[in-house]
Image: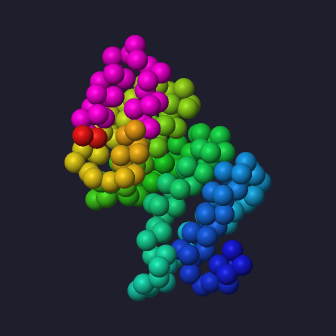
Amino acid sequence: MEYGRHLDNPRAVAYYEATLANAAAQDDDRHMATKHLAMSETAIGKPAAAGSDSWAAHYSPGRWAHESGMILSRLGDLDAAEEHLHLALDIHGLDRRRTRAIVLADLGGVRLRQGDVDGAMATWREFLNCADGIRSAKVQAALRDMHVRLRRYSGVPEAQELRERAARVTA
C-alpha cells in the first residue's frame, strides 16, 4: 500500500486497495475492510490512462464489482454483495463466459445465504448453462462448491437435478 499510494494508475490503486480490503475482511476487520473498499471504489471510478499497457489494465470496473461483492459477502452485507454481483454481470456482458459463470456461481451462493433458495437455484441453473464446455479450475471449484451446498436440499427435486447437471459439466 505504501508503494501503491504514490502511483498515478487508478486501476493499480483500486487493485491494491481491494486486496487490502479483502485481507481485512478475511481477518474480520470490518472497519479496515470498508475503509479500503471505499478507497478502491474511488480509484476504480477514475478514468484509466489512455493507451495504458499497465499490468493492472485487466482490473476493470467489472472485476472490481465482482471482487467487492465477494468482500461484502464475507463481511455479511449480503444485500450489498448481491447488488455488486449484479453490477459485475451487467458490466462483464456475455463476451466473457468464464467470468460470467464464476460471478453467477458466487451470486447463487449469496442468494442461498440470504435464504432465497429458489433464487439460488435459478442462478445456479444459469451458471450451469454458462459453464457448460468451459475448462477452468475456478469453474470446477464453483461446481464443487455448488454441489456441496445443495446436499442440504437432497429432498428437493430441483436441487438433485442441479447436482446431477453439475456432475455432467464436471465430467
Q: Which residue lies at the image location 40% right of the left edge and 32% below the top edge?
A: 147
* Res 105 quadrant in image: top left
Residue 5 or 153: which is nearer the viewer?
153
Q: Is residue 170 left or right of residue 17?
A: left
Image quadrant where one finds the N terminus? bottom right
142 within the magenta span: no
Residue 13 or 27: which is nearer the viewer?
27
**The furthest residue to the top:** 155
Q: Is residue 98 left or right of residue 16?
A: left
Residue 4 appears in view: yes
Question: What segment carries the magenta color?
Answer: 145-169
Q: Is residue 33 left or right of residue 47?
A: right
Image quadrant where one finds the C terminus? top left
Picture coordinates of residue 106, whole percent (x, y): 46, 43
Q: Is residue 122 left or right of residue 40?
A: left
**The furthest residue to the front:** 171
Picture coordinates of residue 119, whole percent (x, y): 43, 30
